[in-house]
Image (cartoon, coloured by chain):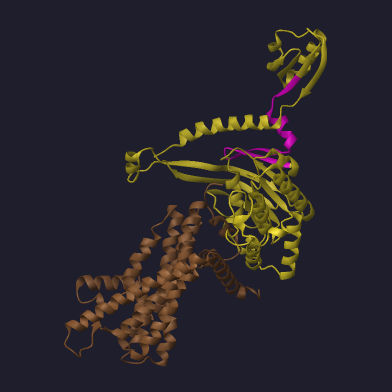
């Protein structure tokens, strides 16, 4: 049985539509307009033990909401989910002892106290035996090289250092399932890399099941073999990172270098010219036409160099998100009610 | 599990310890807080002493002054009881209740919900403000001074019941406070907590005999005894210590126990209901 099972999961919020201006605010005291916002619109997903899965999607797509549902922080409007056999929003202590949620935008450590004090509190809350706690703390602080900072008040740490401490706090009880919500947000490249390395090592050695959301393609490429794309509250893709391009991009990019003055003037008949700097040209060509276009170019003109590439992953994803947002806009307009 | 019996007391100790460490870090703030709440209490005490002076002036010489049947040493016990309950509330529950609204608004409550311990316990007792306890010790001194002057010295039973009813008073106040604070989970924001608290304690810190003898008084007394039992909070323990036990108050004393149990159960219900509809803030 899959360690995480999600069936038809939905979450919608009723949001007060605040009008601009004083008069409208006053009117709002008596009569309010609400809008139903569907953050998650029916997600089905299975995750096996030991998988490292990335949630990818634009802001407001429902990634964080899904993680919060799986952590039991909020309850769904409809649908079911089990994690290690538990229904998260029943908030059973046995469940809460076995998973962790890390949020890059929020911190849980005591701001005015050294991280070590917060860790000790976690030791008590999770009832960790002293020797096991000491071993885990030593191992984690060593891996993240923050041993010297343990006794410094958290408010005096840098963002990167604080994030490392947050990670340690979340991993002290050796969770079997780990939810990471943008753990590298706002960090510089070095700190990002360090945290990626740590997560990769940790997950590989311990076989923890991890769900990660991130906006950084690098995080995802470095860590996850499986990518789940959520846009507009729905699951749009579930597979490998490379598979995204095959599935969502209907074209390839053809780069041609012509010999001397051999470049034709009517490039548009092959496809959509992206960048033309004679004797070099980049053309976007529909995938099914690529063979025909190539053979006619090669037979008709003198070509010095040629390459056929997939469009960059970021571009494909951005394009996909843009389409998803258009759909969502028109749906939300229809959902406005009083 | 064997160690689970000790889990909550141990956690309580760690919460208190961490708060003390934090309070001590900001030393001046700690001292100013302790000093200002002390001054506020001394001013209050002075005010009542003045009232007693006025009453004595207006009476025939030799007559014993009283406020609604409470003679001066008895009234001092009453004031001390108020100080004890309020200082405990402000030291242990007020900082947490106030923070709950903030946790809801910022989404910080997420973390409390992840912990494998009772959420109400965690949210209610996480932080304490030790400086507010200064009044507690002043109140003990006040009791030490007032008790020898009481018309009837307290019995052993009175001394035993006094802490019990102090605890009841604190628990009733806590129940009201956490219920009010929990509404911020529904409302998204509720910063009127401190105002509410002020209104409520304002009513509770007078002898209930004041609300008596006419329709308005009786209405207030019955309402604040049996509907929202805030008059019980100070009156029952103060009476137990300061006045001889009479059968007519046995009923009230038993009711105080029932009210405490009902308040705790009720506030737990409100808190759970509120948590179930927690929405969490953005990301």
Magenta residue check for A233 = yes
Q: Is residue B37 left or right of residue A251?
A: left
The answer to whether residue A49 shows anywhere in this view is yes
From what the image shows, is residue B124 above or below residue B168?
A: above
Could you say where residue B221 lies in the image, as x and y percent from the top left?
28, 73
Left or right of B262 on screen, residue A2: right
Image height check: is B105 above or below B236? above
Position of the N terminus of chain B, as image quadrant, is bottom right
- B124 or A36, nearer to the observer: B124
Q: Is residue A6 above or below residue B142?
A: above
- Say which residue appears at 76% left-offset and 60% top-offset: A139
Question: Closest to the observer: B223 or B106?
Answer: B106
Q: Nearer the viewer, residue A51 or B185?
A: B185
Magenta-tinted stretch: A226-254
Residue A233 in percent (x, y) is at 57, 40
Foreground of the two, A324 or A314: A314
Is residue A87 shown to the viewer in this render? no
Q: Which chain is yellow?
A: A
Which residue sits at x=70%, y=41%?
A: A227
Q: Is residue A261 rendered to the left or right of residue A153?
A: right
Chain B palette colour: brown
Q: Residue A52 location in percent, x, y?
A: 73, 47
Whole-percent x and y of residue B179? 43, 63
């Amino acid at each position: 049985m899959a360690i995480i099972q999600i069936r038809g999961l939905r979450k919608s919020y009723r949001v007060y539509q605040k009008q601009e201006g004083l008069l409208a605010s006053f009117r709002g005291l008596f009569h309010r307009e609400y809008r139903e916002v569907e953050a998650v619109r029916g997600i089905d997903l299975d995750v096996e033990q030991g998988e490292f899965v990335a949630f990818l999607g634009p802001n407001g797509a429902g990634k964080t909401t899904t993680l919060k549902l799986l952590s039991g922080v909020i309850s769904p409007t409809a649908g079911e989910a089990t994690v290690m056999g538990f229904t998260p929003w029943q908030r059973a202590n046995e469940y809460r002892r076995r998973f962790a949620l890390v949020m890059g935008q929020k911190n849980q450590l005591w701001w005015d106290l050294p991280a070590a004090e917060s860790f000790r509190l976690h030791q008590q809350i999770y009832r960790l035996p002293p020797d096991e706690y000491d071993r885990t703390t030593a191992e984690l602080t060593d891996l993240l090289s923050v041993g010297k900072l343990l006794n410094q008040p958290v408010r005096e740490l840098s963002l990167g250092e604080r994030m490392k401490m947050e990670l340690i706090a979340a991993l002290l009880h050796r969770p079997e399932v780990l939810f990471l919500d943008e753990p590298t947000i706002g960090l510089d490249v070095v700190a990002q890399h360090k945290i990626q390395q740590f997560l990769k090592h940790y997950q590989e050695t311990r076989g923890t099941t991890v769900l990660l959301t991130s906006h950084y393609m690098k995080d995802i490429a470095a860590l996850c073999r499986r990518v789940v794309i959520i846009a507009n509250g729905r699951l749009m893709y579930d597979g490998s990172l490379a598979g995204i391009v095959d599935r969502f991009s209907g074209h390839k990019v053809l780069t041609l270098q012509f010999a001397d003055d051999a470049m034709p003037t009517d490039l548009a008949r092959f496809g959509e010219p992206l960048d033309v700097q004679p004797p070099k040209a980049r053309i976007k060509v529909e995938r099914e036409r690529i063979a025909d276009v190539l053979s006619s170019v090669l037979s008709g003109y003198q070509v010095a160099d040629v390459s056929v590439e997939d469009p960059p992953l970021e571009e494909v994803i951005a394009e996909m998100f843009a389409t998803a947002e258009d759909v969502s806009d028109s749906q939300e307009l229809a959902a406005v009610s009083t | 599990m064997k160690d689970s019996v000790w889990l909550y007391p141990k956690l309580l100790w760690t919460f208190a310890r961490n708060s003390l460490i934090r309070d001590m870090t900001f030393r001046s703030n700690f001292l100013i807080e302790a000093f200002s709440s002390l001054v506020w209490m001394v001013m209050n005490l002075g005010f009542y002493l003045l009232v007693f002076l006025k009453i004595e002036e207006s009476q025939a010489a030799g007559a014993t002054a009283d406020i609604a049947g409470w003679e001066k040493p008895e009234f001092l016990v009453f004031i001390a009881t108020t100080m004890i309950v309020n200082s405990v509330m402000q030291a242990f529950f007020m900082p947490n209740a106030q923070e709950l609204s903030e946790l809801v608004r910022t989404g910080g409550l997420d973390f409390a919900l992840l912990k494998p311990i009772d959420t109400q316990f965690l949210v209610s007792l996480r932080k304490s403000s030790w400086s507010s306890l200064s009044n507690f010790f002043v109140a003990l001194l006040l009791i030490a001074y007032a008790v020898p002057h009481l018309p009837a010295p307290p019995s052993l039973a009175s001394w035993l019941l006094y802490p019990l009813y102090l605890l009841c008073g604190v628990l009733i106040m806590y129940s009201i406070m956490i219920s009010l604070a929990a509404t911020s989970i529904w409302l998204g924001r509720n910063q009127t907590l401190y105002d509410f608290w002020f209104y409520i304690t304002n009513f509770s810190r007078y002898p209930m005999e004041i609300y008596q003898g006419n329709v308005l008084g009786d209405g207030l007394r019955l309402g604040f005894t049996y509907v929202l039992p805030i008059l019980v909070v100070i009156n029952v323990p103060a009476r137990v210590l300061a006045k001889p036990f009479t059968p007519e108050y046995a009923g009230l004393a038993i009711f105080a126990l029932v009210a405490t149990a009902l308040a705790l159960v009720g506030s737990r219900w409100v808190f759970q209901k509120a948590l179930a509809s927690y929405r969490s803030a953005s990301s």
